[in-house]
Image (cartoon, rainbow, N blue to C red):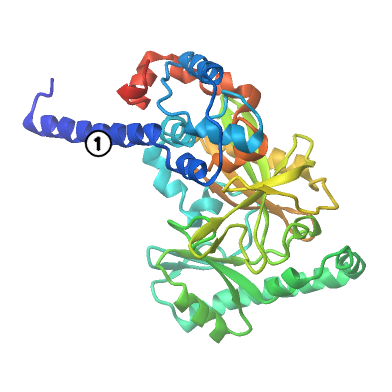
Amino acid sequence: MPKTIKQYKKKLKNTGKSLLRNSTLTRQLRSPETAGTYLKNNDVPALTAQEKAEIDSFWAEYGVKILNYDYYRMFYHVTGKHDPRFIPDSIAHRVLLPYYNDAEKMRAYVDKNMFQRLLPDMPFPKMFGQCMNGHFFGPDGRYVTDELTDEYVNLVYDAFMEAESGKSNHTAENAGETASAATDGTNNAAENAAAHALIIKQSQRSFCGKGVSLCKVESPADLKKAIEENNSGNFLIQAAIRQHAFFRQFNESSVNIMRITSWRHGGDVEIFCPCIRYGIEGSHTDVAFVDGEEIVQVVGIGADGVIYEGGVTMSGKPLAPVIPDKQVPNWDKVVETVRRNHLQLPYFDLVGWDFTLDEAGNVVCIEYNLLHPGTIIYQFAHGPLAGEHTEEFLSFLKDPANREKYLPAAARL
């Protein structure tokens, strides 16, 4: 029992938050929105009594009562795989993530301005400047000013032009290689878009390509105008990526990425559902919005780094991109980079990483995702999220104390 009025009020407040969370989760488990929308838009057969029994039996091992089978109807219909190990999105993000990722530490770690500081060995895009809480920092990460002065703009612009000069020299030294890459059935539209261009990205609460601007910069005045137009008080200025020819196969205009979900348990890091995620024509990011609709396209990647034949959209529609080169270059290096760096994030066991390769084949990490790394479309492309690791991945729910803490009463057996 709380010993003081203050402690009693605090307990009431926390109990209210717990009840609110449980109420929200119960509602999502009973009426999953994404699966419900899919079922409305597609002719999907009901599950058989045997299929429901298999799902119930699987989750009973973890003390979970399935309140709605819509996710399974959707997964089975899109993939053709009837597997009770599929993990509904509501369970993934409202039960598993709160267990595996420390919400109290989340806010600082998801600030994109902090990525390089937290993971100094990770190959992020070159940084030219930052603004954090209205404070401006230079190319070296050191504080400069609280005002957008001409001196600051010139500092950032000079760093940008020095990097551009280095790219030009590299291109000249490798002219033969660049020319061959430009004649492999693609054009160099994306390369031209990246010339004298940089990215200004909102560092907080930006997702799915939102808050990301590709800015052409030919002078300090251009740079100052771009900063003023994208100044949210929390943003970063970094190099635009000239991506590898392998990724240009999927779409020329966008920077296409590898989404890799990693799970750390002890000193081991497992890779879940790796995919190529690519944009649509005219978009400069891998996720686009058309008339308010989120457009996401993925193709799965096998453990050997070879992409699958077909892909899928977020709405569950099949894709058949024509991709001549199916082996992801430097795949082993990408996986090693994920595993090494995940071990440096001690408060987070489940991470969604976005990687690409630059034109020279160097590994580049665009960002990592802790709050909502996504599960639905990647299971569309691969099958169950944790695959052969599912039993171990869910094992914490065998503990009654964990079930009581992370599951609402309505979903507990």
Q: With 62 as the anchor, is 158 left or right in this view?
A: right
Q: Nearer the viewer, residue 13 or 25?
A: 25
Q: Amino acid at mark 1?
A: Lys
The residue drawn where x is 47% and y is 72% is 230
Callout count: 1
Above or below 178: residue 265 = above
Residue position marked by numbered label 1 in the rendering: 17
Q: Quadrant of residue 387?
A: top right
Quarter of the image where the C terminus is located: top left
Q: Secondary structure at mark 1?
A: helix
Q: With 310 as the anchor, is 317 left or right in this view?
A: left
Above or below 280: residue 96 = above
Return the x and y of residue 345 as percentages of the image width and height.
53, 38
Quarter of the image where the N terminus is located: top left
Return the x and y of residue 342 as percentages of the image width and height.
59, 38
Q: With 215 as the anchor, is 136 left or right in this view?
A: left
Give the residue furthest to the left. 5
The residue drawn where x is 43% and y is 23% is 66
Dot 1 alpha-carbon crowd within 10 angstroms: few under 14, some 14 to 19, many 20 or more: few
- Residue 143 visible: yes
Return the x and y of residue 109 as percentages of the image width and height.
46, 47
